[in-house]
């Protein structure tokens, strides 16, 4: 690997780390939309028109899954946070690939 290749990898890693620093609304969890049936026997939900969707973020707390209700007004922000988490994972994977290449070239500690 040439010195120029190493410099490109280091520059890409810096750009990715800068991008990661902009991901301020990360939400680590799974997005769930649920429909429900209420307790009123004459409600339309008992004829197939269920209530919803209701939005939840499923997160792990103390080793257990918890569903956190997301109000309708906050759905766009919450979905953005889930998308930011997905992007953060992509960035972390690419940085890992870069760092492994630099380690292989023994250039990891020199940057």
Image (cartoon, helix red, strand yellow):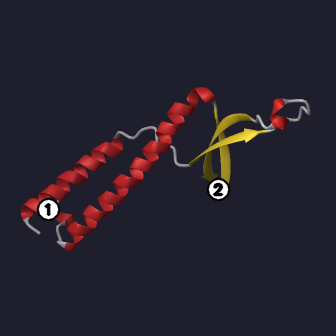
Q: Is residue 61 left or right of residue 106?
A: right
Q: Quadrant of the N terminus?
A: bottom left
Percent x, y of residue 21: 34, 43
Q: Secondary structure at mark 1?
A: helix
Identified at 67% across, 49% down, the residue is 66
Which residue in the rendered view is the most extreme toward the top?
73
Identified at 23% across, 70% down, the residue is 103
Q: CA distance from mark 1 to mark 2?
A: 41 Å
Picture quadrant where residue 49 is located: top right
> Which of these two is toward me, 35 or 2?
35
Which is more N-terminal, label 2 or label 1? 1
Q: Is residue 19 left or right of residue 50?
A: left
Residue 107: mark: none
Query: Alpha-carbon neighbours of circle 2 within 10 Å: few (<14), some, or many (≥20)?
Result: few
Identified at 45% across, 43% down, the residue is 83
Percent x, y of residue 104: 21, 73
Which residue in the rendered view is the most extreme toward the left?
3
> Which of these two is toward me, 18 or 84?
84
Percent x, y of residue 108: 21, 65
Q: Determine contact: label 1, label 2, CB under 8 Å.
A: no
Camera-side mark, 1 or 2? 1
Query: Alpha-carbon neighbours of circle 1 within 10 Å: few (<14), some, or many (≥20)?
Result: some
Q: Is residue 17 above or below residue 107?
A: above
Q: Quadrant of the C terminus?
A: bottom left
Q: Is residue 65 above or below residue 68?
A: below
The residue identified by callout 1 is 6
Residue 62: mark: 2
Q: Is residue 53 left or right of residue 105?
A: right
Q: Secondary structure at mark 2?
A: loop
Identified at 12% across, 61% down, the residue is 5
Percent x, y of residue 76: 52, 32
């Amino acid at each position: 690997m040439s010195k120029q290749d190493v410099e490109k990898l280091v520059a890409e890693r810096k750009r990715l780390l800068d991008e990661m620093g902009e991901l301020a609304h990360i939400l680590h969890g799974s997005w769930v939309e649920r429909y429900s049936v209420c307790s009123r026997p004459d409600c339309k939900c008992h004829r197939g028109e269920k209530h919803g969707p209701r939005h939840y973020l499923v997160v792990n707390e103390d080793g257990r899954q918890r569903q956190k209700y997301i109000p309708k007004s906050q759905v766009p922000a919450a979905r953005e946070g889930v998308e930011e988490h997905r992007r953060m994972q992509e960035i972390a994977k690419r940085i890992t690939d870069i760092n492994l290449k630099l380690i292989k070239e023994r250039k990891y500690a020199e940057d």
